[in-house]
Image (cartoon, grey):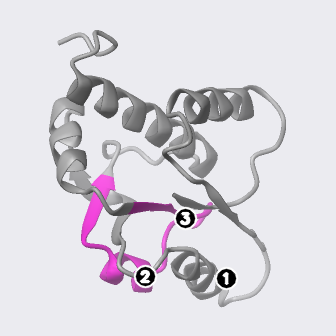
Amino acid sequence: MAAVGRMRPGPLRELQDEYLKRLGGTVALVEVEERRTGPDLPRREAARLLAAIPPGMRLVALDERGTTLSSPDFARHLSEWNDAAFVIGGADGLDEAVRERASFRLAFGTATWPHLLCRVMLLEQLYRARSILAGHPYHRS
């Protein structure tokens, strides 16, 4: 998982760390430096995000214009995406270069969410999906 910005100490960081712990080291998080200046900011962020993804990985971009999935549907997709790398853009979203490279665009609804909150939401959904696939009662239908 590659995400723009650095999570500072506080409640969101605590949630992020909790879900990373629950995922037992199966999710690597790469924080890409966020720079708020310059007209080419989205292009620079895109280059950093794409550079953080290992070759051969399926790219799944979090994008408000993407496909919304229920948690069970996300779990089914995840079971097919053994080689998935998720990317989360910065405050201005993702550059078109990342969207074009993505094999799937995932949306958490039509609302716009803060990028640091999306990181926690994705980690929770990854944990929930793994729980669903393992038959664990964390997810209640």
- Which image quadrant is residue 49 in? bottom right
What number of labels is visible? 3
Q: Mark 2 packing: few (<14 Cα in 10 Å), some, or many (20+)?
A: few
Q: Residue at x 58, y 67 (%)?
A: 92
Q: Is residue 5 left or right of residue 80?
A: right
The residues tagged by marks 2 and 3 sit, at their Cα atoms, a distance apart of 19 Å
The magenta segment is: 85-106
Looking at the image, can residue 35 be seen?
yes
Q: Position of residue 6 (x, y in %)?
A: 76, 55
Nearest the viewer among 33 and 115 is: 33
Inspect the magenta stretch and tell me whether residue 102 lies in it: yes
Q: Residue at x 60, y 54 (%)?
A: 29
Q: Position of residue 43 (x, y in %)?
A: 58, 87
Nearest the viewer among 122 and 26 is: 26
Label 2 or label 1, whichever comes before in sequence order: 1
Against 83, residue 38 (above or below) is: below
Q: Which residue is mark 1?
A: 41
Q: Position of residue 129 (x, y in %)?
A: 30, 33
Helix, strand or loop for disc 3: loop
Inspect the magenta stretch and tell me whether residue 111 lies in it: no
Q: Residue furthest right?
A: 9
Against 43, residue 93 (above or below) is: above
Q: Which residue is mark 3?
A: 89
Helix, strand or loop for disc 2: loop
The kind of residue on which mark 3 rests is Gly
Against 140, residue 134 (above or below) is: below
Q: Mark 1 packing: few (<14 Cα in 10 Å), some, or many (20+)?
A: some
CB contact under 8 Å: marks 2 and 3: no
- The quadrant of the image that shows the C terminus is top left
